[in-house]
Amino acid sequence: MATICKIRWQNIDGSTSERWLVEWRDKAGKRSRRQFKTQPEAKRFHATVELGVAPAPTGSGGDIIRFTDAALEFIQSRIKLGREPSTWRAYDRHLRLHLEPLIGEEDVRALRRVHFHELQERLLAKLSPALAKAVFVTARAVMAYAVEREWRLDDPAKTVRFKRSGRDQARIDIPPKVDIRRLLEAFGAAEVAAGAPPSRAFMLVRVAIGTGMRASEIRGLRVVDMKLDRTPAQIEVTQRADQWKRIGPPKSRNGRRTIPIGPELAALLRRWLPLRPNLDSPLVFPTETGAVMDLSNFEHRNWRPALKHLGLAGAKADPGCRKWTFHLLRHIYASQLIELGLNPKQVQMRLGHGSVTMTLDVYGHLWRDAEREQQEVEAFEAKMR
């Protein structure tokens, strides 16, 4: 018995997409699905299923299983698994804008390693390295799903590594401490130190620098997660707010963590809590109505004007690759941990990275021992004499 229905979803740009879905079970009771762009296509396929001549769900023989159809089913499976909208909408955007024009009509059973090497080259030719890699990762996820659905036995994309030149990777350069102090001054640090009540903008910047929390984690921070009576005081990261202001779990398993904070930041938070715009809200930084704050509003009203005032409003702070974004405050926190002598594993746990490899990829160049380097180069020169 087969069923046919229309499915709709909203894209990140606000537009709506739709497909026709045919679902059926084979003689063994295994459930299968296939999507079509038009109702006539779906009805024709539905008729073949009803007659018992539908292609085997393993992908052997029968009609072509287009990459686009496989990708659409993959996206629907991620939605049913409860993936965040930002995740599956990115998949959909990658498919519509980049993958469908390049390999959308290819049969997933016929794709080989060479096709994915070619796909990589074509993506790098027209996209930035970061976006090209993200799109390529989506293609690999679709092929892994094809193996999971038994449309093919092997995954030709799995062993194709994305080649990205080291020159394309932006180096995380930390701004000098004088600029960090200037930034805090621009948000009223001197006035707060003199006894003035701290503003929400100042507290957002101070918490970001003092904890390394992601913007989404700060926006979702609850009052009950503030353990200010402990020694040292701590903040427990238990949830985050996405770009649509929906509360959910942290980005990764390691995202759930406890961050120790200094006495100065703890004192500032004690002063801030009774000054919140909505005292009935469970959030530390709510709006006046008690809802999750919009980061773009903060950036437009507070962050960018402060950078402009400091002469840092351009896209880059210097000829290097450092950009003055709110996320830079997280990098500043990480650099301070490294200066204090924390090892990569400790920094990973403080930041909530999924793996220590990620921590080393981003901050590895900051772990250096100047005294030891001097001894090494002197020893090298001595051997060369």
Image: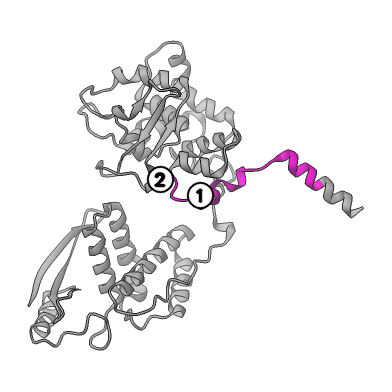
Which residue is found at the position 62% from the left and 43% from the top? Answer: 367
Asked which secondary structure carries label 2, the reply is: helix
Q: Report if residue 65 is visible in the image.
A: yes
Query: Image height check: is 98 above or below 314?
Result: below
Q: Which residue is the site of mark 2?
A: 254
Q: How crowded is mark 1: few (under 14 residues within 10 Å), some or many (20 or more)?
A: some
Look at 41% across and 60% down and name the residue there. Answer: 134
Magenta part of the chain: 353-377
Q: Where does the image place residue 164, in percent across and percent down from the top left?
A: 53, 63
> Residue at the location (15% across, 74% down)?
38
- Vertical placement of residue 323 versus 128, above or below: above
| Depicted 329 relative to depicted 227: above or below | below
> Which x, y percent locates residue 261?
45, 27
Label 2 Cα crowd, 10 Å radius (few <14 / some 14-19 / many 20+):
some
Q: Is 223 positioned to the left or the right of 39 in the image? A: right
Q: Residue at x 23, y 86 (%)?
A: 63
Q: Name the residue under label 1.
A: 356
The x, y position of residue 41, in whole percent, is 14, 79
Quadrant of the image occupied by residue 102: bottom left
Compare marks 1 and 2 and give the one earlier in the sequence. 2
State the image quarter where residue 259 is shown. Answer: top left
Camera-side residue of 29 and 159: 29
Tell me the SS state at disc 1. helix
Q: Is the magenta stretch mostly helix, strand or loop?
A: helix
Q: Is residue 155 left or right of residue 183?
A: left
Colouring convention used in this rendered image of the protein: one colour
Which of the image's four quarters has the N terminus? Answer: bottom left
Is residue 356 highlighted in magenta? yes
**Residue 300 in view, yes or no:** no
Give yes or no for residue 123 being in the magenta stretch. Answer: no
Name the amino acid type tagged 2.
Answer: Asn
